[in-house]
Amino acid sequence: RFTELAPRWAQLARSVAIQYEPTQLIITALERLQQNGVRDATLVDVALEATRINQPLAVEVFFTQNRRDDVLTADGDIDQSALEDPTTYKSGIHFQFKYQLYHLRILTTGGTDDKDTVLSNTWQLEQAVGGASGSR
């Protein structure tokens, strides 16, 4: 992990990452899920909770451009059945971005680019971050 290889740089990177709006959205979603008893959240759990917090940002962060019409209903609600398809999600969120958050000790595990495991790969905060988007 970056936090072990270069702790001081990692501390700076972590503070910058925590200020980034998509990171705040993910942290807030995971904190809410944990408060509701969901310890090992899935990508579906995080994406759905994120849409409840800030739907426009969540749609931009989580879903591929060509699948957004499948995710959003005509009324602007979320079609939860579309969330069960791993091709709905941007690989950047469940692979690269999740790994960045792992290397900064925000999440407990890194991401996956294996579409067969995307939906079962767990999302869990390393520790409570607190203060992200006023979630506490």
Image (cartoon, rainbow, N blue to C red):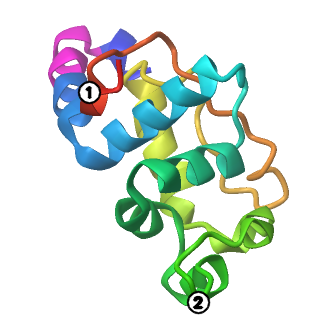
- The label number, if any, that marks residue 94 in the structure image: none
| 11 within the magenta span | yes
Amino acid found under the numbered disc labelled 1: Gly
Residue bearing mark 2: 74
> Hey, which quadrant is residue 75 in on the image?
bottom right
User: In this image, 60 relative to 121: left or right?
Assistant: left
Residue drawn at x 36%, y 24% as measured from the top left:
104
* CA–CA distance in space, label 2 to label 1: 31 Å
Residue bearing mark 1: 134
Residue 53, above or below 91? above
Residue drawn at x 74%, y 40% as measured from the top left:
121
Part of the protein shown in magenta: 6-12
Residue drawn at x 44%, y 40% as measured from the top left:
26
| 127 within the magenta span | no
Mark 1 neighbour class, 10 Å CA radius: few under 14, some 14 to 19, many 20 or more: few
Residue 92, above or below 44? below
Question: Which of the pair 121/78 is nearer the observer?
Answer: 78
Indicate the position of residue 3 as horizontal and vertical percent values.
Answer: 35, 15
Indicate the position of residue 37 as horizontal and vertical percent values.
Answer: 71, 19
Residue drawn at x 69%, y 33% as measured from the top left:
41
> Hey, which quadrant is residue 69 in on the image?
bottom right
Mark 2 neighbour class, 10 Å CA radius: few under 14, some 14 to 19, many 20 or more: few
Indicate the position of residue 100 as horizontal and vertical percent values.
Answer: 41, 38
Amino acid found under the numbered disc labelled 2: Ala
